[in-house]
Image: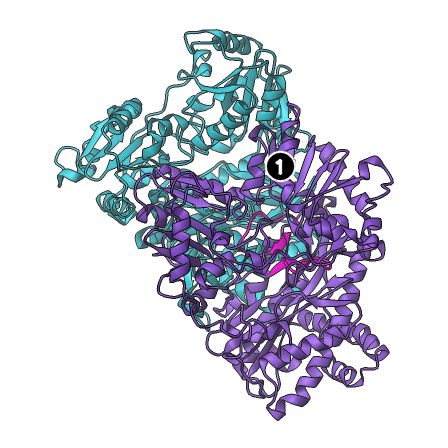
Chain colours: A cyan, B purple
Amino acid sequence: MSMASQESDAAMSPKLTGEILRQLRQAMRNCKYFPEPIQAYIIPSGDAHQSEYIAPCDCRREYICGFNGSAGTAIVTEQHAAMWTDGRYFLQAIQQMDNNWTLMKMGLKETLSQEDWLISVLPENSKVGVDPWIIAADQWKSMSKALTSAGHSLVAVQDNLIDVVWPDRPERPSTQLRTLGSEYAGISWQDKISTLRSKMTERKISWFVATALDEIAWLFNLRGADIEYNPVFFAYAIVGLDTIRLFVDVKRLSDPILREHLQLDSPSKPELSIQTFPYETVYSELQAICAALGPKDKVWICDKASCALTQVIPKAHRTLIPYTPLCLAKSVKNTTEIQGMKMAHIKDAVALCELFAWLEKEIPKGTVTEISAADKAEELRSQQKDFVGLSFPTISSVGPNGAIIHYRPLPETNRTLTQNEVYLIDSGAQYVDGTTDVTRTVHFGTPSAYEKECFTYVLKGHIAVSAAVFPNGTKGHLLDSFARAALWDSGLDYLHGTGHGVGCFLNVHEGPCGISYKTFADEPLEAGMIVSDEPGYYEDGSFGIRIENVVLVIPAKPKYNYRNRGSLTFEPLTLVPIQVKMMNTELLTEKELAWLNDYHRKCREVVGAELDRQGRKEALEWLVRETQPI
Amino acid sequence: MSMASQESDAAMSPKLTGEILRQLRQAMRNCKYFPEPIQAYIIPSGDAHQSEYIAPCDCRREYICGFNGSAGTAIVTEQHAAMWTDGRYFLQAIQQMDNNWTLMKMGLKETLSQEDWLISVLPENSKVGVDPWIIAADQWKSMSKALTSAGHSLVAVQDNLIDVVWPDRPERPSTQLRTLGSEYAGISWQDKISTLRSKMTERKISWFVATALDEIAWLFNLRGADIEYNPVFFAYAIVGLDTIRLFVDVKRLSDPILREHLQLDSPSKPELSIQTFPYETVYSELQAICAALGPKDKVWICDKASCALTQVIPKAHRTLIPYTPLCLAKSVKNTTEIQGMKMAHIKDAVALCELFAWLEKEIPKGTVTEISAADKAEELRSQQKDFVGLSFPTISSVGPNGAIIHYRPLPETNRTLTQNEVYLIDSGAQYVDGTTDVTRTVHFGTPSAYEKECFTYVLKGHIAVSAAVFPNGTKGHLLDSFARAALWDSGLDYLHGTGHGVGCFLNVHEGPCGISYKTFADEPLEAGMIVSDEPGYYEDGSFGIRIENVVLVIPAKPKYNYRNRGSLTFEPLTLVPIQVKMMNTELLTEKELAWLNDYHRKCREVVGAELDRQGRKEALEWLVRETQPI
C-alpha cells in the first residue's frame, strides 16, 4: 500500500476533543508543571528541530484538535480553543475539528493574529505557556513582546502539556542509520568538519550548535528514516574547534559499520574524535559548555532554532544566523552529488515514462484512479536501483482536484482518470544517490482550447525561468516574475512561489535559496545549487496545471561579461517529456520552441538509453513519440 | 547661469580641515555642550526632516570634511576622522578631502561599518555623540544597540557641534510660500485633513506628527523654495482629531493670500482652525501634547523621523509607521494632478524637442559643451508656462562622462558635444502643474554597432517594464528584473534601481513605491501612482546609456481577470522621441516595434500639436522626422 493511500481512513470526520481539552486545562492549572496556573497554552505544529515534516510523536497540534494539515497553531485558554491555519486548509480544518474549536482563517483581514486574539480574550496579567523546544527563538521573541506590551507574559513550560494528556503517544522513532560513503557524499564528514571549523575561525566563533536534522545528516554523511519522506534522524550536534559532540539515541550506535564510519573506536586525529551523548542531554551539555565560555567566546546558532536551546547561550555569547554554514555548504552540491542527482533523475524519468505509457493503455478501461495511479508511480519507482521511498506524498489529481494546490487523494475524493479531464501528478522519490520532485500535467483525450492556452502560458513561464541568464550574485526571488509574465499578460496568476531548494538524498524542500516573490532573505544563487522551477495555473472547480522540473544552477557564457561578474543559468535535471498535446504552439516564440525541442532531444537521448538498457520497450516507444521535434 | 554650472569653482581641490577639526574636538571635550567629554561625534548628511536634498545651512558633513556628495557620514574621534560613502563617490571624496580624513569605501568587503570602526578605535566605555535631530530614530536604535553591546554609549548632544565651529553658517531659508488652488491640487487641504483624520480614527490614533517636508507641503497645498530643486519649506505639523498645529517661521504668514488660503483669520469650522507656532517650538509643543495624553492615546510618527522628536513620544503611546498616511495618499495622484502632470510633460517635451533640434544644428560647429547644452535645456524649459525651476541638477554627459551615473558637468570635466560620441541628458523641471524627469541618449553622428546593441537591450528593458501587465497588489520591485532580462541575456547589467516615485510639483524622488531590486518594503503599485522607468547601461571609460520616461500606473484590461483581482499597466507621461538611429531594430520583436511606433505616434500627435500652437517650427520638423514609423 502506497503512502498516498495510507492515513486516509478517518481523516474527514471531526475528532471529539472535549475530554482531552478538559484534561489539558487541568494540566494548565496544575502547579506540578508550572509554579502558577497558566491562562493559555500555545501548541504550534513542529518539532524541536523546526522540521517541515514531523514524526507521529510530534503531531501534538493534530492530537489536541484533530486537524492534520501541515501548518497550523492551536491555542487553548480556560474558555476558548482556537486554531490558526491558512487558505489551503480552511475546508479540511472545518471537517476535522469539532465544535470545541474555532477556526482562525489566516490571511483574511478580519482574522485576529494569535497575539491580538490572546490579548482580546485573556484576563489581565495572564500567563501564556508554550513548550520552549517547539517554538523558534524568533517566534518566541515577537510573541513575548506583544504579550508583555499588553500586561501579560509568555512563559516556558518545560514539560509538554499535550504529552501529559496523551496516554498512547507514539515513541520517538529510532530507525537504523545508513552511512553514505564518498561515492555518494563526495566529501568525507571529516572534511566537512574542517570546512566548518575554518568558517568558525574566520568569524571568531568557538562553538556551533546544529539543530536542523538535515544539516546533521549531511554533516556526518548519515541518513535515517525517523521522519516519513525525509531521510533524517533525531540528533543534535555541537562542534567546537577541537571537539565534536553528537547527541543521538545511543542504541543506534552499536552497528560496527556505523562505528567505523564515524571512527568512534579509533579516531584518526583527536580533534576528529566524536563524543556521543544521549539525545536528551543536549540541554545540560550545552549548559556546561556555556558555563566554561571565555569572555570573548561566541556560539553560533540558527535564529530558527528552538527557544529552549537558544536561551541556554548567554546573550553576550550568542551569535544568531539566518542560515548556518552547514545550510549554505549543503546547498551547493559537489560533483559527486550532482552526478548522483543526475542519475536519480534518469531513473525517476524511466519510472514516469513507464507510468505515462501504462496510463495511456489503462485509462480507457476506466479502472485507474488518482490513488491507483499514485500507487503505480510508486511501484515503478521502487523498481529502480537504490530506491529508498517517496520524497513527499504524491499529488495525483484529476480535473477540479487539480486546482487544489496541496491536494492528496483520499478515498472520499478519489476520482477516476478519464480521457475528458486534465491530470496533474506531482511526485518524487528518495534514491540513495539523489532526491527527485517532478510535476507533469497531461490530457489523455483532447484538451480544450482554454486548457491549452493556460498550459502554454505556464510553459512559457517555466521556460523563461529555466532559460534565464542572470549575473552571479542574483537572488532567486528576482527571477520569480519571469515565471508569471505570460500569465499576467492575460490576467492570470498562481498563488504560490515558483521554486524551492532541493536536497541530495535529503529533504525535498531546503534552504537557503529558492525562487519566490515571498522572500527577500534568500541567499544568492550559485553554481551547484539545485532548485525546482514550477509555475502553475489553477482554475477553481475545473482543472490545475503545473510544470515542474528540478534544475541545476550552472555557469552561463553569454556574449559579454560585465565587470567580470560572470553569469549563471539553469540545466534541467528532470528529463520527462512535457506533453505537446497540451500546448497551443502558435503562442510559443521561436526561442521557446527551440528550448522545447532541445529539452525533448535530451530526454530522448539520455532517458531513452536507460530505458533501452532496462529493456522497457513500451515506455521507450512512448518516449520517442512524445519527444518528436515540433 | 544655470544650476548645472554653479557651485563648480573650487569643488575639486581638497578643503583644509585641520583647524576646524581642532575646534570640533575642543567642543567635544567642552562640558557646555554635554556634561561629560565625548570621545566621538557622528555627522550624518541630512536635515531634521530626513530630506534627500538639503539647504546650505544643513550641509554640515560637507563643512567638516569638504566632501559635497549627496550621501556620506563623517565620524570624528580624538585621534581619527573618517567618512563613509558609496562607490558613486569614491573618486570625488578622495579629491575633496584632505589628509586629516580617511575615506571608508562602503560596499567593499574589507571596509568596517561605522559601528565596527568605532568599536575598533574607541577607548573603553566611550561616549559617542550625535545631533538627535539629524539622525533618524531607526538609525539611532541600531547604532545605539551596537555601541552598547561593546560597552560604549550613544548620547544625544542637543547643540549641533558643527554649528558651534561654523562661524559663517548660512541662515535657514525662509522663502515666500506659494498657495496651490484646487485647479492644481485637486483636493483642498481641508479635505486632506478630513481623510487623514478618518484614517486616524480607523486605527484609533489621536495624533499624527508630520515631519517630511514634502508631506507637509502636500497636506496644506503650499509650496516653498527653501531647498533647491524641491518646492518645499521648513515646517512641522501636528494634527489631532480636532486641532491642527503648523510650525513654521511665522514671518512667512503675513501674506494675505496665504492667510486666506489657510483660513488663519476666519476658519470655517473650529476643527479646521490652524494654530501656527514658530518652527523651533515643535519639540516643546509635542512635549506638552504628550504630557496630556490619555492612557489609550496613540501618536503616529514615521519610523524615519528624527530621533529627537520620536523620543518625545513615550514608548507606550508611540506608533511608528514606515509610510505615513500622507505619504500613501500623496503617492496616488488625483485626476487634477494627473492632468497637470500630463500638461507639464507636454511642455517639457516641447523644450526637449527644441533642444535636440538646436543641438543637431549647433554641434557641428564645435561650440556646444555639456554645460552649455544643460544651460540651453534650462533656458528652453524656462520659456514654458508655469515653469518654476529644475527638479534636479541636469546630468549632461558626453562619451566616457556618460558612464558616471551621477555625473554633473563641472568646468574641469566639461566635454564638447561632437558627432563622434554618445550624449546622455537626464533632466527635469518643476512646473506649477507638475514635475518632470526624462533621460534620452542620442548620437549626432554614427553610433557603433556595440553602442546600438547596448542601447537596444536597454530599450527592450524599458519597454518590458512600460508594457508590463501585472495584477493589482503587485509591488514595484517584482518588475525590476523585466528591465534587466535583455541585458542579462548578453551578460550585461546596470547597478541602479529601475524607477522611483515622482511627486506632482513636489520632490522628483518620493516614496512609497518604486521599481528596484534593492527593497522589499515598497508599497504595492496602484492606479494613479507615478514612477520613473529608467534602465541603463554604462561602459566605464566609454559611454553611458539610459532611457527614462515618467509613467502613470493605469488599470489594464487583459483577456481574463483571475480571482477578480484586476490588472495594472503603465501609460508613459514623458512624450519625447527615442532615437531610432541608436537602435539595432533587428533585435526588436514585433511587439516591441509596435510599442515604439505607437509611442512615437503619440509623441507626434500630442507634442506636435503643442509645438504647432507655440509656433516652434524647427522643433516640429525635428519631431515629425524622429517619430516616423519603423
Residue at mark 1 = B284
- B212 or B345, which is in the foreground? B212
Left or right side of A309 for A60: right
One can see residue B183 in this view: yes
Most frequent secondary structure within the magenta stretch: loop
Question: Residue farthest to the bottom?
Answer: B365
Q: Which residues are magenta?
A: B499-525
Q: Determine whether A147 is above or below B247 in the image.
A: above
Question: In the image shown, does A601 or A182 lie closer to the viewer?
Answer: A182
The image position of residue A155, as x and y in percent, is: 46, 19
| In this view, A31 is above or below A234 | above
**What residue is at 74 percent from the left and 71 percent from the top?**
B348
Q: Is residue A299 magenta?
A: no
Residue at left offset 36%, top offset 46%: B39
- Give residue A300's position: percent from left, percent from top: 33, 38
Name the chain letter of the residue that bears numbered label 1.
B
Q: Counting other residues with Cα less than 10 Å from the Cα at mark 1, is it few (<14), some (14-19), or many (20 or more)?
A: few
Of B60 and A85, nearer the camera is: B60
Residue A330 vertical placement versus A39 (above, below) = below
Report the amino acid beneath label 1.
Answer: Ser
